[in-house]
Every structure is written in C-alpha cells, then in structure tokens.
Image (cartoon, rainbow, N blue to C red):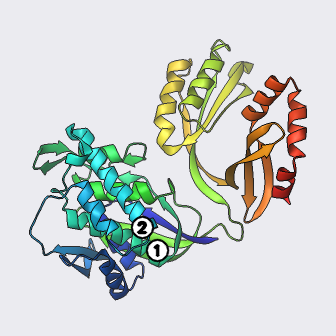
C-alpha cells in the first residue's frame, strides 16, 4: 500500500501546470524553494499565487528568468543538472526527459540531437519545471503515478519555425503510444515539457483507479478556455491491505461465423507480435443457432487502434466491440537461476513480500527438452525440484 498520484489531464498538461498541481496539493513552498537551490543556478526566481480559472481556484507556478536569453543545447542542460546537488536518481530522470524533448525536436526538424537548442520553451524554464516536478513528487511521497487520457486541443500554434497544427509536431512525437484526444478546445493544451515529463514519470495511462482520495491539487495554465485550464492531481491510497499492481487494459472482441478457421493462426500471431497481452478464441452459438467463434484480444490502451486494424485486415469481421477493464496483478519479476541444465529464466509472482508462484519460462524448458531429448514434463519436474527454486519459494 502506498500513495498513488492520478493526473487528470482534461485540459492538457505543461511543466508549470504539473508543478503548480503538486504545490497546490500541499507542498510547503518555502521548503520547495530551498530544495530547488540545489540546482546551483542564480538566474531565476520562483513564484506561486492563487488564481481563478473559470471560478476554480488553482495554483499558478512561475519561473522568472533573470538571465540574458541564450540558446542552450541538450549537453548544456545535462551539465547544469550534473553540477547540481541532487541525487543520481533525480539527475538521471531529468536527463531522460531532456533527451525526449531533444530527440523529438531533432526528428521533426531532421537535424542531429546535439544541434537542438531550447529557445521556444526556454532552457531555464525547462530545467526548473522538470527538476521541480521530480522534487515535488518526492516531497509528496508518491509510490505510483497514473495519468488519464490527455486532451491535446486543436487548431494551430505559432513558432519561430512557422505555423504548426496542434499538438505541435515535437509534442505529438513525444506522445506516441499514449492515449490522447481532443474536445475541440482551440489552443495548444500540451507542451513538449509537459508531454516529456508525464511520459517519463507515469507508470500507466488510463482510467482513475479505485482509491481513497486524501488530497487534491490544481495547477493553473497561462491561458483561459471554456473549461478551467488546470491540471488536476488526486492523491490517495490504493490497493487496501494487498499490494496489487493495478492498471487499465482494453478488451477487444468480435464474433465471426463466416471465416476459414485456418486464418486464425496467422491472425493470432500478428496480434501477439504487434503487442497484444493475450489473444484467445471461444466457441459460441450465434443467431439461428449458427456455430461461431469469439475472438478476444487483451491489450494496453495505446495499442487498441493498432490491434483493431489488424483484426479487420486479417479476418472477415465487420464490427468490433471495445471496452476498458481494470486489472489487478501480482507483482512480477523475471529472474535467471542456475540449474543442472544451465541458466534458465523463471517468473516470480509476489503478493506483498510473499512469493505465491514461481514458473520456469516455457521457451527455456522447450529448448532443454529438445536438446537433451527429455520429455517436457520431466524438465519442469527437475527444475521445480532445484534447490534455488525451493529456496525462493520458502
């Protein structure tokens, strides 16, 4: 059991909105500001103030850059973080976020990563928002971060390079694989820094988990829209007394009664290769007592559309049902152990600190059975009697 953070991005996300939401959830600003002196930069001032966004109170966080505007490249941002007094975990995560932004900019502008410079979003703003978010989350004692689908807005945005559609090309690149949508709010709701931050720190994207909410914070954006332009942060306990892992997955289903059954093998292989968590077929009876098959695919939210297209292309289905379901999982770990057959991989499943299951990987056992000319069943028996396995389970 631990504190879970759920970011509700109904009006997008930016670096300053994220820090504002964290501060609004109860962080002492003076303690936060003291912690940020570890950056060892004297060219910025931090402020916070309560503002109203469509009659909703929120915290507006701002970085006032006192230095002369200069272009900084990724190596410059990394050097500042490396020279700070923060621990290695914050340094590493911050540099990963900087790299995400730089790689996205480099790709859309067809240039080397090292040539990217932070001029549109401001290098100091980027550094402070990124590091500030990481510092604030640590001060809140967050164990797990879940993010909603992200509202990206619509329309166009002006940059020094020209006029681009929303989400801006670099932002869209960073959000690849993340569930996004637009409610037709005209404006840029997600910035590259906001996108890079949430994709690096979030454990999963989907629906709000079942949780006992203890604190709520609202971080204000700079613009005003029809909806409150805020990022909502909900903090609470999840999982009760059992330390389950939880996420939300998509369940894709279709009923098929008019297809050559030989096509299922290729379809299932294509789905699994494309990232499906599981694929299975059930026998059903449809209208007019026609025998048929129900094809079911389990997948992450971001793979939903990709796998739906594969089903349409590989089967005779003309309609597919999709729903989202919450999933509870045991904590899992893949570990290599030594056996009389050599090194193999086992999957360990835990509830809290108790090991409930330990299973040898099928492909390893199959390889051993074939090379040693031993029945597969016998391989499993021998491995499960291995002292290493017994000790892990005890």
Q: Quadrant of residue 88?
A: bottom left
* Count of marks overlaid on the render: 2
**Image height of 313 relative to 28, above or below:** above
In the image, what residue occupies the spot 33% across and 60% down? Answer: 13
Residues at marks 2 and 1, CA–CA distance in whole angstroms: 10 Å
Tell me the element at label 2. helix
**Disc 2 + disc 1, Cβ < 8 Å:** yes
In the image, what residue occupies the spot 81% across and 36% down? Answer: 341
**Image height of 198 relative to 319, above or below:** below
Q: Pinpoint residue 211: horizontal percent, then vertical percent.
A: 58, 68
Q: Pointer 1: what residue?
A: 138
Residue nearer the viewer, 383 or 182: 383
Q: Pinpoint residue 8: horizontal percent, then vertical percent.
A: 42, 62
**Image height of 72 relative to 386, above or below:** below
Residue nearer the viewer, 15 or 377: 377
**Image height of 105 relative to 97, above or below:** above
Q: Of the numbered discs in the image, which one, if any, rests on residue 90?
A: 2
The quarter in which the C terminus is drawn is bottom right
Q: Is residue 180 left or right of residue 361?
A: left
Tell me the element at label 1. helix
- Density class for disc 1 (Cα within 10 Å; few <14, some 14-19, many ≥20) is few
Q: Is residue 227 visible?
A: no
Q: Pinpoint residue 259: horizontal percent, then vertical percent.
A: 63, 14
Q: Is residue 298 visible?
A: yes
Residue nearer the viewer, 366 or 31: 366
- Density class for disc 2 (Cα within 10 Å; few <14, some 14-19, many ≥20) is some
Q: Nearer the viewer, mark 2 or mark 1?
A: 2
In the image, what residue occupies the spot 49% across and 68% down? Answer: 5
In the image, what residue occupies the spot 71% across and 71% down? Answer: 241
Q: Quadrant of residue 254?
A: top right
């Amino acid at each position: 059991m631990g504190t879970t953070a759920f970011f509700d991005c109904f009006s997008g996300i930016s670096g300053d909105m994220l820090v504002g939401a964290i501060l609004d959830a109860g962080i002492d600003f003076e303690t936060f500001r003291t912690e940020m002196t570890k950056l060892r930069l004297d060219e910025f001032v931090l402020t916070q103030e309560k503002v109203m966004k469509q009659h909703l109170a929120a915290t507006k966080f701002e970085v006032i850059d006192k230095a002369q505007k200069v272009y900084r490249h990724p190596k410059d941002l990394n050097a500042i973080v490396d020279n700070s007094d923060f621990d290695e975990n914050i340094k590493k995560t911050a540099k990963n976020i900087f790299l995400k932004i730089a790689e996205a900019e480099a790709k859309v502008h067809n240039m080397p990563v090292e040539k990217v410079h932070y001029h549109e979003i401001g290098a100091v703003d980027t550094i402070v928002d990124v590091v500030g978010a990481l510092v604030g989350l640590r001060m809140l004692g967050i164990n797990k971060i879940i993010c909603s689908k992200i509202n990206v807005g619509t329309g166009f945005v002006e940059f020094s390079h020209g006029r681009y559609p929303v989400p801006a090309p670099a932002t869209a690149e960073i959000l690849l694989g993340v569930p996004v949508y637009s409610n037709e709010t005209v404006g840029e709701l997600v910035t590259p820094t906001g996108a890079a931050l949430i994709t690096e720190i979030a454990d999963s994207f989907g629906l709000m988990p079942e949780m006992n909410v203890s604190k709520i914070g609202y971080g204000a954006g700079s613009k005003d829209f029809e909806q409150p332009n805020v990022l909502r942060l909900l903090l609470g306990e999840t999982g009760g007394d059992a330390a389950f892992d939880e996420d939300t997955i998509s369940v894709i289903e279709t009923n098929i009664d008019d297809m050559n059954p030989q096509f299922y093998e290729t379809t299932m292989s294509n789905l699994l290769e494309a990232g499906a968590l599981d694929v299975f077929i059930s026998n059903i009876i449809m209208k007019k007592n026609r025998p048929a098959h129900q094809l079911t695919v389990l997948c992450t939210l971001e793979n939903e559309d990709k796998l739906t297209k594969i089903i349409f292309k590989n089967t005779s289905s003309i309609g597919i049902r999709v729903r989202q379901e919450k999933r509870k999982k045991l904590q899992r770990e893949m570990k290599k152990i030594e056996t009389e057959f050599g090194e193999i991989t086992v999957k360990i499943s835990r509830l809290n600190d108790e090991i409930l299951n330990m299973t040898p990987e099928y492909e390893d056992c199959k390889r051993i059975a074939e090379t040693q000319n031993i029945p597969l069943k016998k391989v499993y028996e021998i491995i499960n009697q291995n002292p290493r396995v017994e000790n892990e389970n005890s």
